[in-house]
Every structure is written in C-alpha cells, then in structure tokens.
Amino acid sequence: MKTTMDPPITLELPLSEPAPVPGCGVCGALARQRADYTAAGNPSRATDCGVEIRNHPHEGGAR
Ligand SMILES: [Zn+2]
C-alpha cells in the first residue's frame, strides 16, 4: 500500500536573505555581489547569490 503525499513544490523561494557566514571569504564576496546586483536592479541575480550563500558548505559547522 502506498501513501503518496507529495508536498507541493514551491517554485518561488521566500525572499528571506540567507546571512553570510562570518569569516568566510566566499560568503562575504557573494554577499557583496548580491548587494551589487540588488543595487543594479537585477533581483534574480541577487537571489542566485543568496542561494549560493545558503548552499555554501562549511567545515565543522562553523557559524
Ligand atoms: Zn561560506
């Protein structure tokens, strides 16, 4: 017996901006790029940067 309860796929991500990890150069650079794209009126690019920040792996769970 199967119970298929697929959650709805949300195509639109919430506009919450992930915070860059303090001390991480990559996150910091992405955050700066995101600000630049936002200032340049390119929100989709800014969102891409936010996603990269969110997905950036950090060893040892550094916060
Ligand atoms: Zn990072």
Image (spheres, rainbow, N blue to C red):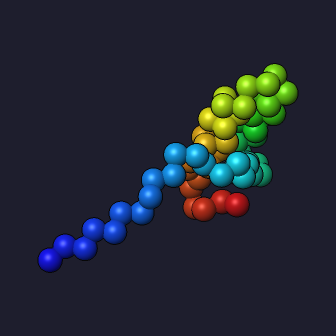
Question: In the image as oriented, which residue stretches furthest toward the top?
Answer: 40
Q: Residue at x 65, y 52 (%)?
A: 14
Question: In the image as oriented, which residue stretches furthest toward the left?
Answer: 1
In the picture, which quadrant includes the N terminus?
A: bottom left
Q: Residue at x 60, y 62 (%)?
A: 61
Is residue 21 at all visible to an observer of this figure? no
Quarter of the image where one finds residue 35:
top right
Q: Residue at x 56, y 55 (%)?
A: 59
Looking at the picture, tell me which residue is in the foreground, 3 or 48. 3
Looking at the picture, tell me which residue is in the foreground, 57 or 31. 31
Is residue 43 at all visible to an observer of this figure? yes
Question: In the image as oriented, which residue stretches furthest toward the right?
Answer: 39
Looking at the picture, tell me which residue is in the foreground, 35 or 20. 35
Q: Residue at x 28, y 68 (%)?
A: 4
Q: Give coordinates of residue 15: x percent, y percent.
A: 70, 48
Q: Give coordinates of residue 54: x percent, y percent.
A: 62, 49
From this view, report whether residue 50 is shown above or below residue 10.
Answer: above
- Count the marks: how many? 0
Looking at the picture, tell me which residue is in the foreground, 9 or 55. 9
Quarter of the image where one finds residue 5:
bottom left
Quarter of the image where one finds residue 44:
top right
Q: Give coordinates of residue 47: x percent, y percent.
A: 66, 37
From this view, report whether residue 30 is shown above or below residue 53.
Answer: above
In the picture, which quadrant includes the C terminus?
A: bottom right
